[in-house]
Image: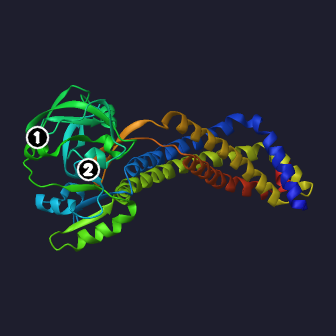
Amino acid sequence: MPRWMSQAVAVTLVNLRSLPQRLSASAVAIVGIAGVVVVLVSVLSIAQGFRATLQAGGDPQTAIVMSSGSEEMASHLSRESVEIVKDTPGILGGEHGPLASAELFVIVNHPKKSTGTTANVPLRGIEPSGFSVRRQARIVEGRLFEPGRNEIVVGSAAARQFQALELGRSVKWGANEWTIVGIFDAGGAIWESELWCDVTVLQPAYRRSAFNSVHLRLVSPETFTALKDTLTRDPRLDVAVFRESDYYAEQSTATARLITTLGFSIASLMGAGAVFGAVNTMYTAVAARTREIATLRALGFAGGPIVLSVLTESVVLAIVGGLLGGSVAWTFLDGHQTTTLNWQSYTQVAFAFAVTPDLLVEGVFYAIAMGLVGGLLPAVHAARMPVAAALRGL
């Protein structure tokens, strides 16, 4: 082992063994860094949970057809266009014809349980085949709405997050009063944040005659390209065709990016404070070991091992803080249910915080970075300490 390395190991071990004697100062740095990691991991877990919820609704064997250049809410498809779409080869057949659901998407205002304030909730009119197109959707309480009646089924996430959406309750939206007859689950997908009803009842309630989209169940994922080419080249139509998995992945991008940017911005501001705390802690540690460092220098220890030992101590404290912060975030936030705004549709999406192993690792690395920055100046100060002056001051 090279001489400088053996010196670094020896000094570092002495530093780490003396940590219990400086527990109070060390705890300040640990808690500060832990707080930053909690905030960072928490905010990033929002983006992760939101992205997972939208992507859970993506099935490569399902396609969505909308008018060209529009989001679903602004899309406009006439009844004639819908019939042309349904007659296209490549759609899986069902008991009552092709598995295709022409749908209308509107927004209703409804109070949240957590705050009592109103928020945008998506109300979707579907055709009877709508559940067959979305294979993961199933009724878990009550029953499916009957065609032609003012009945709705509520996604399980919407029922948890919004007031008065229990089975048997009545609510008034548009020109109709609706009765809740069922609760459905969709395997954690975005549809659990929606309310579904018969599209032929929803259209007159909101004075609409057209549809926003058609959702199709394909014969196989491989038929998507052929179906897309057929529809987009048809001169009678002006439509865009998306694979459902791609559409919802793209939908999650804007909101997830915004949340991630916000998370790193907040963590950077808090991290600056934590770095100052680490700097103060390490300067205190260096001051408490002035005699020891001066003696080591007098015995021939180089400045490099001194720098490395101080940086190692700072990183160790940072790792402890990072692990503590990650543990707190995982214990109290993982799986916590909440809602956020989907900036693509301007509706509330219910989802669960997802504190994943990747986020915990990212939090620890962020903590290590803070430890390195916070320990650098005190480490250099310790290495440059004049030996004679240090010994005379004791």
Q: Name the residue under label 1.
A: 174
Label 1 neighbour load within 10 Å: few <14, some 14-19, many 20+: some
Measured along the vertical axis of the image, is residue 52 above or below residue 233? above
- What label sits on residue 297 in the rendered view? none
Q: Where is residue 70 in the image (x, y as percent from the top left)?
A: 22, 62
Q: Position of residue 354 (x, y in %)?
A: 48, 43
* Disc on the earlier residue, 1 or 2: 1
Q: Residue shown at 26%/52% (left/top)?
A: 99
Give left or right: position of 237 versus 344: left
Q: Position of residue 268 (x, y in %)?
A: 51, 52
Which image quadrant for residue 182?
A: top left
Q: Mark 2 points at which residue?
A: 346
* Circle nearer the viewer, 1 or 2: 1
Which image quadrant for residue 326?
A: top right
Quadrant where the image shows the N terminus? bottom right
Q: Do the residues labelled 1 and 2 touch (CB within 8 Å)?
A: no
Q: Position of residue 309 (x, y in %)?
A: 78, 52
Element marked by disc 1: loop
- Amino acid at pointer 1: Gly
User: 294 or 391: which is nearer to us?
Assistant: 294
User: 132 or 380: which is nearer to us?
Assistant: 132
